[in-house]
Amino acid sequence: MLRSLTRLVYRPLKLDHGHALHTTAKDCFSSLVSQDARAATETPRAVFYTSESDPAKHTERHEGRHYSIPLEEVKAVFPHGLPPRFQRQIKTFNEAYVMVRKPALELFAYLRGSNFAHPAVRYVIYGERGTGKTMTLCHVIHFCARQGWLVLHIPDAHLWVKNCRGLMQSSYNKERLDQPLQASAWLKNFKISNERFLKEIKTHKKYVWGKRESTEEGRPLGEVVEQGLARVRSASDAVGVVLKELKQHCQLGAFRLLVAVDGVNALWGRTTLKKEDKSPVSPEELTLVYNLRKMMMNNWTGGAIVTTLSQTGSLFKPSSARFPQELLGKEGFDALDPFVPVPVPNYSPTEFESCYRYYLDRQWLQHRQARTDGGKEELRFLSGSNPRQLERLAAPL
């Protein structure tokens, strides 16, 4: 047994690739769990499931349990932003179940107790890789959407600062660069999740897009979105107008605004982008980043700013970095300060048990030995109770 565990300990770099880990896990089960191990007893669904599907009603008594989001609602609220592996799980199980966890409950309490007449409070979700930061953000987004908030969701902000094609000089400001492909993609998804608001919100001023194209004052904000979708060259400027108008309207009390940014640390630091002369592009030179940075300021009222820090978006940062001061750097930290830090840890024993029971209930763990008490403990050990690693380990079993 010690030899088997030693092989596992000294092969940590293969965890993220998956294949070697899955093979090792199967070998470990074969060698450490006897053929006649006692099968895990059936557990009532109440251990891992709650029938309360409204996030606004989630409390500590729901902690560690899974709640269901109707698939139609998933399409409307999350046209983008869900982790890829969770999207595949939805397709596999034909259902969307999200675990109620303490960090999300903490954020719900903050939002319920907020005075929206005061400047928007900034919340920064952080933690180790794979602990569920993005899913916590998605839980908050669902909470606010159910409360009738307008949700301005920026998923994977790091995609705006690396490997972007089609950079163009801005027609509005020659010192900035537009990203029409990224801007039009975001506008398309923003329209899906906020179509009702786009019909109700009216523009504060006239916007000129070209010699023959303009949006008059008092027109539905949806026309600005359509302009960006129909004329891709105008998409980046259209995003800027949308952000500006939302900021103005929410301060008048027309609606509550949630600004949700996944991987906000990508907005500061370095990019992988190059200009035509091969010189590097700084984040503030990108029209999208420039305008989104302004939304991160707490100089507006009527909403909240909830963000996550992502190791994926930490270009040129050590892979071990996980704390705000490490991932944001001095410039980013100063820009967001003051903020409320919200750590997301690995699964607690209760959360691990709930996730394990959910996989059993969905017949996701097919290997006979994985369904025993000994197999459960091996999964706990190999994953370190890390949600992402547990999902990867369970996938081939």
Image: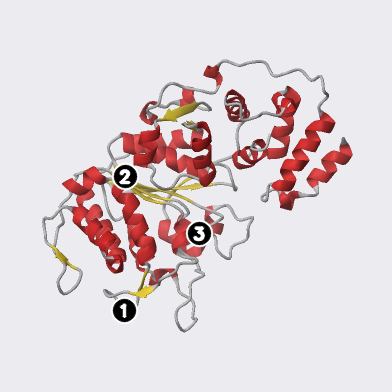
Q: CA distance from mark 3 to mark 2?
A: 29 Å
Identify the mark nearer the N-term, 2 or 1: 1
Q: Is residue 286 above or below residue 156?
A: below
x, y percentage for residue 380?
69, 33
Q: Which residue is mark 1?
A: 174
Query: Under tag 2, what secondary structure?
Result: helix
Q: Is residue 394 above or below residue 62?
A: below
x, y percentage for residue 31?
84, 32
Q: Is residue 154 left or right of residue 394?
A: left
323 or 200: nearer the eye? 200
x, y percentage for residue 375?
74, 28
Query: Under tag 1, what secondary structure?
Result: loop
The colouring scheme, among rainbow, by chain, secondary structure or one colour, is secondary structure
Q: Which residue is mark 3?
A: 328
Q: Which residue is mark 2?
A: 193
Q: Is residue 341 left or right of residue 152?
A: right
Q: Residues within 10 Å of mark 3 (few under 14, many from 20)?
A: many
Front label number (3 vs 2): 2
Position of the N terminus, as image quadrant, is top right
In the image, what residue occupies the spot 80% across and 49% down? 10
Q: Residues within 10 Å of mark 1 (few under 14, many from 20)?
A: few
Q: CA distance from mark 1 to mark 3?
A: 28 Å
Q: Is residue 85 above or below residue 207?
A: above
Could you tell me if the residues under marks 3 and 2 are in contact, i.e. CB atoms within 8 Å?
Answer: no
Is residue 333 something that shows in the picture? no
In the image, what residue occupies the spot 16% across and 56% down? 203
Numbered label tally? 3
Q: CA distance from mark 2 to mark 1?
A: 32 Å
Disc number at residue 126?
none
